[in-house]
Amino acid sequence: MGDYQRALASGDITAVVASFDNGGYFREPSGGTHIHRGAHELASLYEHFFSNGGGIRLEQCASTDDGRACAVEYNVVGWGRTTMSPQAGIAIYVRGASGKIAAARIYDDVDAPIPSKQD
């Protein structure tokens, strides 16, 4: 989880994707069709996420980890070149057999300073 968090903060797409298990997925807060699975989809998603000039900076508040799943409560405080007022969320990460992320499910209502993918 630490490798992923550092890659997210620095905007390193390659390192973010490498922290996921083969076939791992990222579920956006809106759920439904907003699930991105596999290296190609993850790279495309994070390229979009980092399109504001860099990574996503989180202020981590609390976490719990049972060795298989990890929950991280956070505040988003920066997104690329934009400094933000803290916006709260929680992320649930499930590890695959490799120890890498098999599932990342994000629950927040952050107003991201990037255009929507439909724009």
Image: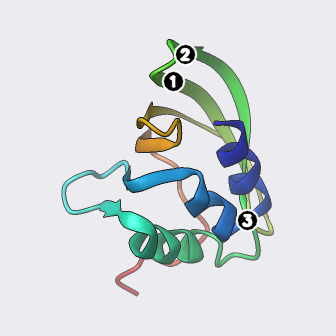
Whether the residues at callouts 1 and 2 have beta carbons within 8 Å, the answer is yes
Q: Residue 11: which disc?
A: 3
**SS category of the residue bearing label 3:** loop
Residue for point 76% across, 69% down: 54
Q: Give the mark, 1 or 3, whose residue is nearer the N terminus.
A: 3
Q: Is residue 61 left or right of residue 34?
A: right
Expressed as whole percent of the image width and height from the top left, the position of residue 91 reads 49, 35
For the residues labelled 2 and 3, say whether their Cβ atoms are less than 8 Å apart: no
Q: Which residue is mark 2?
A: 65
Instruction: Please tell me whether mark 2 sits on a helix, a strand or a loop.
Output: strand
First in sequence, mark 2 or 3: give its number: 3
Q: Say what secondary structure mark 1 lies in.
A: strand
Question: Where does label 1 land, which residue?
Answer: 70
- Percent position (x, y) of residue 48? 54, 76
Q: Position of residue 59 (x, y in %)?
A: 75, 35
Kindly identify the amino acid type of the residue bearing the numbered disc 3.
Answer: Gly
- Under mark 2, the amino acid is Asp
